[in-house]
Image (tube, coloured by chain):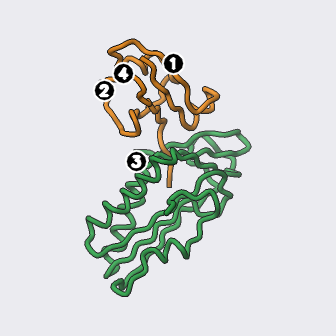
Chain colours: A green, B orange
């Protein structure tokens, strides 16, 4: 199963990976390409985003984030897909689906998964605006 | 000792390639090789050898792949 997608992410298929009769909560988080820059020095709207991944390592690390999150909250299932290449404003750059017996664990696990992804999965983001292009790193 | 250097994101654009071979002296470490790569001033990078993150003191051996990782921006 691929966790990097050069095509628009099929949210329903990510959700389907965590579906289970044991789950009382399914939480789907979408991180969406945004028109305001992540670079405080830039004022003009972002017109496009592009993501570049170190494919084999990003796949491995996305799978590890799923596994580690599941290990931390028993009964939880996690599925992550991250978009690569050009991402139009408004499209999902990342989708994280969490299934859990109860909602508390679903919220905690979802937050943990996105925070961990931002810390360590080797994916880079380039913003394009009228000011030009810039690579935007996540703040620690 | 011949290694391969892999570049990503802005470094890939600046170098004009995603990887290149590099001959380094025997006994080289990540730190000694990084110092020769003329990275942009102020850019904080992480480094991986053979797809595992390593510290700067890690030794480099024949055939190793050294990946230079600018700040990541996924999510």
Q: Residues within 10 Å of mark 3 (few under 14, many from 20)?
A: some
Judging depth in this view, the residue of A131 and B54 nearest the camera is: B54
Q: Where is residue B9 shown, x and y percent of the image?
A: 57, 38
Say which residue label 4 marks: B31
Instruction: Judge from the rendering whether residue B34 lies leftward or rightward of residue A67; answer left or right.
Output: right
Q: Earlier in the sequence, mark 1 or mark 2?
A: 1
Say which residue label 3 marks: A120
Marks counted in the figure total: 4
Say which residue label 1 marks: B38
Q: Residues within 10 Å of mark 4 (few under 14, many from 20)?
A: some
Say which residue label 2 marks: B58
Residue contact between numbered discs 2 and 3, judged by CB atoms under 8 Å: no
Q: Residues within 10 Å of mark 2 (few under 14, many from 20)?
A: some
Judging depth in this view, the residue of B24 and B45 nearest the camera is: B24
- In the image, what residue occupies the spot 38% across and 82% down? A25
Q: Nearer the viewer, mark 2 or mark 3?
A: 2
B41 is higher (above) or lower (below) than A73: above
Q: Where is residue A88 shown, x and y percent of the image?
A: 68, 58
Let me know if marks 2 and 3 both belong to one chain: no
Q: Chain of mark 1?
A: B
Instruction: Judge from the rendering whether residue A46 lies leftward or rightward of residue A114; answer left or right.
Output: right
Q: Nearer the viewer, mark 1 or mark 2?
A: 2
Q: Earlier in the sequence, mark 2 or mark 4?
A: 4
A60 is higher (above) or lower (below) than B41: below
């Amino acid at each position: 199963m691929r966790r990097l997608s050069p095509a628009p992410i099929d949210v329903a298929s990510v959700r389907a990976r965590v579906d289970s009769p044991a789950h009382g909560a399914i939480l789907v988080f979408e991180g969406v390409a945004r028109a305001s820059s992540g670079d405080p020095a830039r004022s003009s709207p972002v017109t496009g985003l592009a993501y570049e991944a170190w494919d084999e390592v990003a796949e491995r690390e996305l799978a590890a984030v799923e596994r580690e999150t599941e290990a931390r909250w028993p009964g939880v299932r996690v599925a992550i897909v991250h978009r690569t290449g050009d991402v139009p404003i408004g499209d999902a750059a990342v989708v994280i689906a969490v299934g859990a017996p109860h909602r508390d664990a679903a919220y905690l696990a979802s937050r943990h998964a996105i925070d961990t992804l931002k810390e360590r999965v080797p994916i880079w983001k380039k913003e394009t605006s009228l000011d030009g292009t810039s690579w935007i790193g996540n703040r620690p | 000792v011949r290694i391969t250097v892999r570049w990503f994101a802005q470094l890939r654009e600046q170098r004009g390639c995603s990887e290149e071979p590099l001959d380094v002296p025997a006994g080289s470490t990540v730190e000694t090789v990084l110092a020769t790569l003329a990275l942009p001033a102020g850019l904080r990078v992480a480094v991986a050898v053979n797809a595992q993150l390593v510290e700067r003191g890690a030794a480099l051996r024949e055939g190793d792949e050294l990946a230079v990782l600018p700040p990541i921006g996924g999510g």
